[in-house]
Image (spheres, rainbow, N blue to C red):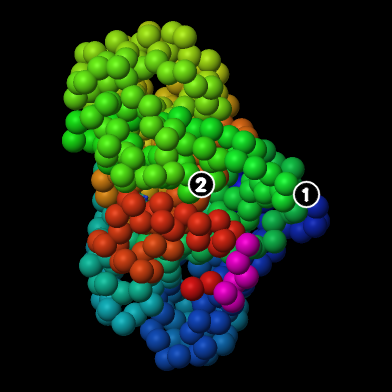
Amino acid sequence: MKILSKEQIYAADKATEQAEHIPSFNLMERAGGYAYHYLHQRLQNQPVNIKIFCGTGNNGGDGLVIARNLIENGYSVVTYIVNYSESRSTDFLNALSVLKNSTKNWPQLIKSENDFPEIQPEDLIVDCIFGIGLNRPADSWVQKLFNHINESRAYVLAIDVPSGMAIDQLLKDEVVLKPTVVLTFQTPKLVFFLPQGGKHINSWEVLDIGLDRNYLNSVETKAQLIGKAEAKQMYKPRSKFSHKGTYGHSLIIAGSYGKMGAAILSGKAALSSGSGLVTAYTTRQGMPIMQSAAPEIMVVTDRHNGDFLEEIKFDLQPDVIGIGPGLGMAKTTQDALKNFLKQNESQLVLDADALNMLSENNDLLELLPQFSVLTPHPKELERLIGSWSDDFEKLKKAEAFSDKYKCILVLKDAHTIVVFEGKYYVNNTGNPGMATGGSGDVLTGIITGLIAQQYDPLSASIFGVYLHGRAGDIAINHTGYEGLTAGMIVEFLGQAYLDLFAQESEKK
Ligand SMILES: NC(=O)C1=CN([C@@H]2O[C@H](COP(=O)(O)OP(=O)(O)OC[C@H]3O[C@@H](n4cnc5c(N)ncnc54)[C@H](OP(=O)(O)O)[C@@H]3O)[C@@H](O)[C@H]2O)[C@@H](O)CC1
Ligand SMILES: Nc1ncnc2c1ncn2[C@@H]1O[C@H](COP(=O)(O)OP(=O)(O)O)[C@@H](O)[C@H]1O
Ligand SMILES: [K+]
C-alpha cells in the first residue's frame, strides 16, 4: 500500500476536485460522511455520550460534518471548537454554517483551560483538532487539553491523525492526544510506523474517501507499506521438476564460544525459508554442536582450535553468504573478516558482529559487493551511520548510507524498514514477542535463504522481513508474547508461507 507524503495528500485532494469538478467542501462532506458511517456501523445508535473536539482548519471541518450527521441521526453529541487560532479555513466555515442551519445543537467554544469540559471514562471522544496541517507545537493550553482528554481514559477516535502529531517532522516536546484508534484518510501516514510517533498509536485503520484513482495509481511514493498483498506478489512458486540445486546453497558464517546458538538459528532459518542446501562455517569447537543440533546443515570449520574464528577460508561456491551472528569481536576474527572481504565475490547478508566490525573499520565498507544486505538493529545502525536527532533524520541518514555503499539497509524495529535507492519499504508484521534473543539471527538466515533461491536481494529483504514477522504473529497464537522464542519463529516459517495463500475464513 502506498504511503503518501503530506504534499502528495494535498495534491490528491486537488486532483480529485479537478477530476470530479467538485469544490473542496464536497470532499470534506464526503470524508466526514464516511467517517460518520464508520462510527454509526459500530455504535448502532447506542446511547453513548459523544464529545467531538474540532480545530479551526479542515480537520475541524471534518469534525463538524461528523457532528452534524450524528446529531441528525439521533446521537447525543456535544461539539467543541478549540480556538487555537482566530483564523478559520473556508471549508471549516462552510461546515459550520451547514451545521448551524440544520440543528440548534451548536458548538461550544474552548478558548482556555477554564472552558475544558469534564470528560467521563464512558464518553466517546472524536479528535478533530489538528490533522495533517499541524506544523508547530500547539499552544500550551491546547496541549493541556490533550492531556486532560488523555487522563480521562475515554475511548478516543482520532480523525486522520492524532492531534499534536506532525506527520513530517518530530516537534519539540511533542504532546499528543492519544487515540484508541486512528481513522486515517486514504493512506496510512509514515509517522505511524516510526518509533517516536508510533508509540502513541495502538491501532489505525484506513478510510477510503474516494480520492482520485488516476492520481493514486500513478503517484510514486517514497514509502510503501508491505502487507500480505505485496508479499504474495513476491512469492516464487516451486516447479515440479526442481531439485535441491534449484534452490541454491547458503553459507552461514557465524558462531563462537558460547554463541553457537546464533549459527544454529540462522542456519535453520535459511533451511526453513527454502534454501536447497545450507552449510555453516564456524569454529572447530562448534562442529559437534552444529551437527547434533541440525543434521540437515553441513558444517565447515577453520583450521584453528580457538574460541573465535581466526580464518574465513573455504572451498565452496555458495550462492550467498550470511555472515555475522555470534561471531564476537576478537581481533583475529576482524582480521579474518577483512581478508575474507578482500577476496569474496558472493552476494552477502551482513548482521550483528559483522556490522560492528564494519563500524570499527569503515574502509571495509568499500569492499562490500553491490547490493549487499545489512540488517542492523537500532544500536548497530547508530554505530554504522552515527546518531540522529529524530526518526526522520535517521531515515535520511540511512538513505544516504545506502546510496553511498549501494547496499540494502534493513532497519530492524517494531516496523522494520528496508531502505534502498531512496525508497522505504515499511513492514507491517511482527509483534513485541519477537523482542527476544536470537530473533535477528533468524532474520539473517531467512534473507540469506531467499537470496539462495534467486530472490533478488531487495525482494529477499522485503519478503524475508514480512515472513519473519508473520511467523512471529502466527507463533504467538500458541505461545503468547512472553513465551515466544527465536527458535519458534523458525518453526512457524512454513505457516507464514501457507498463510500467504490462506483464505480469510481459514485464518486461525
Ligand atoms: N485529502 C484528504 O485527506 C482530505 C483531508 N481533509 C482534512 O483536512 C485536514 C488538513 O486540514 P488543514 O490543512 O486545514 O490542517 P489542520 O490539520 O486542520 O490544521 C489547521 C491549521 O492550523 C494551523 N496550525 C498548524 N499548527 C498549528 C499550531 N501548533 N497552532 C495553531 N495553529 C496551527 C495551520 O495553519 P497556519 O497557521 O500554519 O497557516 C493549519 O493549516 C486533514 O487532516 C483532513 O482531516 C478533508 O477535509 C478532505 C480530504
Ligand atoms: N516490538 C517488536 N515488534 C516487532 N518486531 C520486533 C520487536 N522487537 C524486535 N523485533 C524484531 O526482532 C528482531 C530482533 O533482532 P535483533 O535485535 O538483531 O535480535 P538478536 O540480536 O537477539 O538476534 C528484529 O527483526 C526486529 O524487527
Ligand atoms: K485529529
Q: Amino acid at mark 1?
A: Asn
Task: Name the element at disc 2.
Answer: loop
Vertically, is 421 above or below 485? above
Quote the CA–CA distance across marks 1 and 2. 37 Å
Label 1 CB sits under 8 Å from any ligand 1 atom: no
Could you say which quadrant of the image residue 246 lies in?
top right
Residue 273 circle label: 2
Which is nearer the eye, 165 or 371? 371
Residue at (30% x, 59% y) in the render: 484
The residue singled out by tag 1 in the image is 214
State the image coordinates of residue 262 (x, y, percent, origin top left). 30, 38
Spot occupied by residue 162 in the image (x, y as percentages of width and height): 41, 57
Residue depth check, mark 1 versus mark 2: number of the one nearer the observer:
2
Camera-nearest residue between 235 and 173 = 235
Pinpoint residue 304: horizontal percent, then vertical percent.
25, 17
Q: Residue at x 63, y 62 (%)?
A: 501
On residue 462, which mark appears? none
**Image: magenta residue range:** 501-506
Q: Quadrant of ligand 2?
A: top left
Disc 1 crowd, CA 10 A, few/some/many (<14, 14-19, 20+): few
Q: Is residue 77 left or right of residue 241?
A: left
For the question of whether residue 28 can be seen, the reply is: no
**Residue 78 seen in this snapshot:** yes
